[in-house]
Every structure is written in structure tokens, then in C-alpha cells.
Amino acid sequence: MDLQNRPLKKRPLFSNRLSIITVAAGSAIGLGNIWKFPYITGKNGGAAFIIVYLCCIALIGLPVLISDFMIGRRGGKNVVGSFRALAGDRSPWLFGGFIALFGSATVLSFYGVVAGWSLGYVVKAVSNGFAGKSPAEVGAMFNDFVTSPIAPIAYQLIFMSITAGVVYAGVKKGIEAFSKVMMPILIGIIVLLCIRSLTLPGAEGGIAFLFKPDFSKLSAAGVLDALGHAFFTLSLGVGTMITYGSYIDKDENLATTALQICIADTVIALLAGIAIFPAVFAFGVEPGQGPGLVFVTLPNIFVQMPGGYFFCILFFLLLAVAALTSSISMLEVSVAYASEDLGISRKRATLFLTALISGVGIICSLSLGQYRESLTLFGKNFFDLADFAVSNVEMPIGGAISVLFIGWVLKRQKSEEELTCHGKIKVPLIAAFIFTAKYLAPVGIAIVFLHSLGVI
Ligand code: PFF
């Protein structure tokens, strides 16, 4: 269907360019930046890994993000509706829409659990729960918390209710208004944490770890981690950026917007690194701890640091706020679909889908604790399975579908119209973008995908 034949029913649009960037960067910036990026950087040896990660963002992440925006804005509907509008009613490309629906719901089910932990840790930090504890005790505390049957689920449900409240309020009054308040708070907190970390004696070791590359520490698995994480951190392949793209005004420059979002996301990930590693080095802690880096190592450091009580609260608050602006974008994918294509009211859709996704999240949470033995499938507990299914399978497939669709299916002239706002603006490097969408990005994605399945 052509732009001119878009359905007449009025859809909401983000108010202006700043709103678009705030909301889409709010989706991109989340646990991926503050929890995952630091620990995979620690695990993969620091600066050399970061250089590869930056290349993955520029060469693959950015083209996929532009493609997602193009599909959303040109299609002008939810993720399934956009593919339908562009490819036709019975096109196999609709699979791209349905798999994204599945992916966004799955990612939210386990993301809500980790975000719940962050909320729980805000409360622990406020009640000074880490004071006087040895590192082993803080480690045991984390383990007891995430494996207990009640507390993490209660926090997960609180987190999911806030997410639902924002989405329930709508695209402009909920998502846009919320992100506009939360994102500046997030930036303020992270800058404060960086200043605290950088002024600790011995902070230089952390800065060298982040910015002085040592390529001997980089492995093939590290390169693949970098590419996989580029997808996760930019919220690609699960329909989020397609759905948000459909709320972007037709006169906005999509390529520049996407570039600014990549830059914002990268800057926040690096700031998270700067907030964490100087402290890690100043206190002589091992940087390659894995997922416990943020929940175990950091509280240990905070208790020894001047002002640690406040910085600990601020840190977990930062994690929770960042997670919220991402989780609303995940829920919006299926809510937009249900309300537009299934004719369910937006409010009902929000309630029903939140209940469904939270239910799956509860299973993920329980699968880490006493039901570990029974809640497993294909040798993984449900939590790990949801994470694996999205990050290693669904996101690469969804991302590949977007670039392949733009590279091979959408007519070149239509792509140019979308990128140049029907000739109103000049955009350089269109040929390079199309080339990347056709060849480079799909091949790169195929490599990660096959590796993550153990084929190569
Ligand atoms: N980009 C988010 C992060 O880095 O935490 C995660 C995410 C958000 C993934 C939205 C997928 C999504 F649809």
C-alpha cells in the first residue's frame, strides 16, 4: 500500500524531534547499557572489546535501526500492520511482524524480572541493607533474593504495573510525557555517579581498562558478544523501533534521528562503564565477574566508599528508571497490534497483555529458585531460555528481516522517498546504506546467529 493510501484513522505522532529522540533513546537505554554492557566489557577484557562493539553499532546496528524506522513510518501501523501495508495481505514478510510480537513479549517477561530486582535493590539500599556485610554475604544475599519465591515476584509485579500505567495512558500522554521526565533524571544520576567514581583514589586503572585497547584479550566469542549486544542495546529486531517509527512525523530525517539515538545509547553505555570500572579498580575487585557485577560487586564497593549509602540508592534508582523507559517500549509493540488489528480497546489490551506477560515472567522468576528442576526446557531454566530465545534467536532473525526487506523488497525509489522525506532533504550515503542493508548487515547477522546456535 502506498503512503497516499494510508488509512485515514488518525494515529498519534510524537510531538517533535526532541520527543522522538527522547522516547526512542529511552527504549534503547536500559538494563542493556547499565547492567549488561559493563559486565560483558569486563568479561571480554575492556577497551579492545569496546572498539569492536562500536564498529558493530555503526556498521550493523545503525542500518537495522534506520530500516526499522523506515518500515514503521512507511507502513504507518503497528509491527504486523506495517509489514502488511508494505508487502500485502498474504505476504510471507508478515512473519517478520508476528515473530517481533512474540519477541517483544518474551523479552519483557524476563526483563521485568531483572528490573524488579533493581527495584528491590533500591529498597535494600534505602534501608542500608548492605552495611557491615562481607563480600561473601552480599553475594549470598543476591542469591537468596533472586531464588526466593515471593519477593522478586512482588517487585516484578510492581514494576510491570508501572509499565502498564504508562502505556495505558497512551503514546503522547503516557510514553512521551514519562520519557521526557525520566531521561534527564537518568542522565543527571549517571553523571553524578561518574564524578564520584572518577574522584576515587586509584580510579585511573578503570579508565585505562576502558580506553587503552589490548587486542590480545579479545576472542572470537567476544566479537560475537559485541554484535549480539548491539542488537539488544538498540532494541532491534523485536518490533519496538518499527512501532515507534510509525509515530514519527513524515518530515523527520530518519537517518539523522537513528544516528543520534545510536550516539546517545553509546554515550550512556560508556558513562555506565566510567561510573563502574574506576570504582572496581580503585577497590581492587576483579572486573570480569559476569552478571553479578552490578548486583553483587557494586554494593560491596558502595559500602566501603565515602557517600556510598547515597550513591548506592542512586545507582539502583538509575537502573530501575532506565529499565522502565525500555519496558514501556516493549509493551507498546503488542498493545499497538492488539488495539489496531484485533479491535480491542487500547486500555483493555494493556491490561490483558500485562497480565499475560507478567505471568510468563513469574514462571521465569520461579525457574531460578525452588522450581529450578521442574521449570526447564531444552536443558535451560525458563529465565535463561527466554533470554536465549530473544537475544540469540529472535533478535537476529527479526533484524535480518528488516534489513532484507529494505535492501531487497522495498523499491529503491520508495526507500529514497522515505530517507529524503520525498525529496525535501538531502541525505548522503544512500547507496552505502542500501548496500549495507542488502549484503553487509545480513551476512554479519547470519554469522552471529549461526555461531550462537553452535553451527560455526
Ligand atoms: N535496549 C534495551 C536495553 O538496552 O536495556 C533492551 C530492549 C528494549 C530490548 C526494548 C528490546 C526492546 F524491544
Image (cartoon, grey):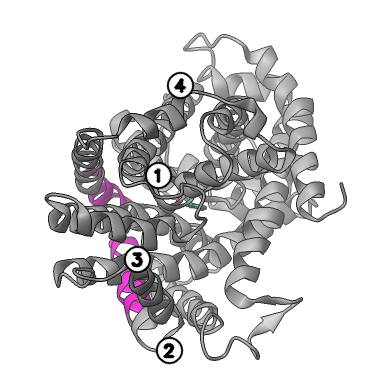
Badge 2 crowding class, 10 Å Cα cut-off, few under 14, some 14 to 19, many 20 or more, is some
Q: Position of residue 160 (x, y in %)?
A: 36, 71
The residue that label 1 is drawn on is 29
| Range shown magenta | 155-180
Q: Is mark 1 within 8 Å of ligand 1?
A: yes
Q: Amino acid at mark 3?
A: Pro
- Secondary structure, mark 2, is loop
**Magenta stretch encompasses residue 169:** yes
- Secondary structure, mark 3, is helix
Viewer-proximal residue among 297 and 386: 297
Badge 1 crowding class, 10 Å Cα cut-off, few under 14, some 14 to 19, many 20 or more, is many
Query: Decide: marks 2, 3 in contact (CB < 8 A)?
Result: no
Q: Position of residue 166 (x, y in %)?
A: 29, 61
- Secondary structure, mark 1, is loop
From the image, state whether disc 2 or disc 1 is nearer to you: 2
The residue that label 2 is drawn on is 149
Q: Earlier in the sequence, mark 2 or mark 1?
A: 1
Q: Residue at x 76, y 76 (%)?
A: 378
Give left or right: position of 348 versus 120: right
Q: Earlier in the sequence, mark 3 or mark 1?
A: 1
Q: Which mark is residue 135?
A: 3
For residue 293, above or below residue 353:
above
Query: Decide: marks 4, 2 in contact (CB < 8 A)?
Result: no
Determine the residue located farthest toward the right in the rendered image.
Answer: 455
Q: Amino acid at mark 4?
A: Thr
From the image, state whether disc 3 or disc 4 is nearer to you: 3
Kindly report the secondary structure that dominates the magenta region of the rendered protein: helix
